[in-house]
Amino acid sequence: MKMRVFKTKWFSRFVRKEQLDDARLAAAVREIECGLHNGDLGGHLLKKRMARAGEGKRSGYRTILVYQKGHRAVFLYGFAKNEQDSLSPVELKEFQKAARVYVRLSDADMGKALEEIDYAEQEISQ
């Protein structure tokens, strides 16, 4: 099965505003495929840090995504570390609910509801 990577409309606006391109999102998923993420939030929900241009990941962005190993990833939410420290308990519960929906959607429905990014499975250097 081929890994597919998607982003929600909200997340698409976020990455445009922050000038994050699809190649950086694909690289983040490749890192996740190697087990490199920043927290399992339960129910197929992960947190992944992404660096700002010219800076490290620690002061960069936090992304929240639904992840099913070897199958699909859906970027749901992102925020700059300097604007928000972490998710509130209410936000976490809502994202966990959304994850349950995305996990159950068929591939055809995913393609209709979300924007798919080009994801080429490649080795990453560690």
Image (cartoon, rainbow, N blue to C red):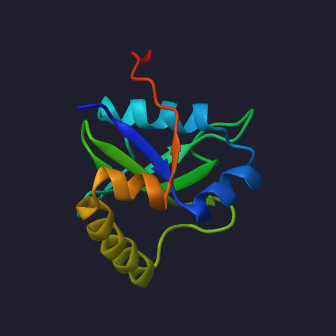
Q: Is residue 74 above or below residue 77?
A: above
What quarter of the picture does the C terminus occupy? top left
75 sits left or right of 83 in the view: left
Q: Residue at position x 50%, y 68% from top?
A: 86
Residue toward you, 15 or 46 = 15
Residue 17 visible in this rendered orientation of the protein:
yes
Which residue sits at x=70%, y=36%?
A: 55
Q: Nearer the viewer, residue 126 or 122?
A: 122
Does residue 42 appear in the picture of this structure? no
Tell me where residue 18 appears, x and y as whole percent: 74, 51
What is the tally of numbered marks visible in this picture? 0
Residue 123: % across, % down: 39, 15
Q: Residue at x 63, y 55 (%)?
A: 12
| Location of residue 112 with respect to 19 vertically, above or below | below
| Residue 53 placement (x, y as % from top left) | 73, 36
Image location of residue 54, percent across then percent down: 75, 32
Q: Quadrant of residue 23?
A: top right
